[in-house]
Image (tube, rainbow, N blue to C red):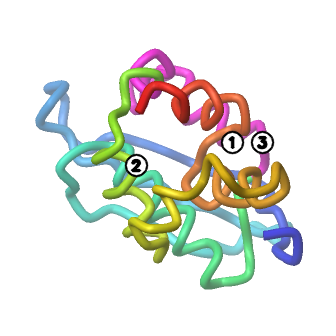
Amino acid sequence: MDNLQEISRMIFEPQGWLIGFRTWSLSAYDSNNTIICKVDKSERHNYLKYVRFIIALKNKGYKLRKCDRLQLKSGEKSFLIQSYISKAKKHDFYEIANIAGISNSVVDNIKNVSEIEQRKFAEMVGLEYHELIDNLYKW
């Protein structure tokens, strides 16, 4: 994902007022304040929407900045909550990796590849490297 350009800003807003029944809208903008993409389809949980947002950006030649990833996972506005990431199970990684176009066999082997490949995988599924490593050895 090194060849992708970082977005200039992002907006994430809920539609609906009741937590658990909100549908989130995630939008990214370029340096000219032109919308790059918007992801607003309802998902089973917000991490799936987050990964779909990452993939939609990648398909347009963009990626989130680290500050955007951290903001989305900060618990701000109750979109994603950082502490839930550490509770992810292997089947959760299969699901998010599949959305990113990554096979289950790659997930199964991620412990055995280089740090560079692990970092690439982490970025593709919206994790920071330390979040991936923290989870890898719980499976």
Please name the residue shown 56% across and 63% down the image. Answer: 54
Q: Amino acid at mark 3?
A: Lys
Q: Main secondary structure of the magenta part?
A: helix
CA distance for labels 3 and 1: 5 Å
Please name the residue shown 45% across and 28% down the image. Answer: 85
Q: Is 31 or 104 nearer to us in this picture? A: 104
Q: Is 67 or 30 nearer to us in this picture? A: 67
Q: Is residue 95 left or right of residue 133?
A: left
Q: Where's residue 75, x and y in %?
A: 47, 20
Please name the residue shown 55% across and 55% down the image. Answer: 125
User: Which residue has dot 1 on it?
Assistant: 68
User: Which residue has dot 3 on it?
Assistant: 66
Q: Give, as a single range, the part of the protein colored magenta.
A: 65-85
Q: Is 28 or 131 nearer to us in this picture? A: 131
Q: Is residue 42 left or right of residue 96?
A: left
Q: Is residue 16 above or below residue 38?
A: above
Q: Is residue 76 magenta?
A: yes
User: Which residue has dot 2 on it?
Assistant: 93
Closest to the camera, between mark 2 and mark 1, is 2
Q: Is residue 47 left or right of residue 91?
A: right
Label placed on residue 104: none
Q: Where's residue 93, x and y in %?
A: 40, 49
SS at mark 2 in the image: helix
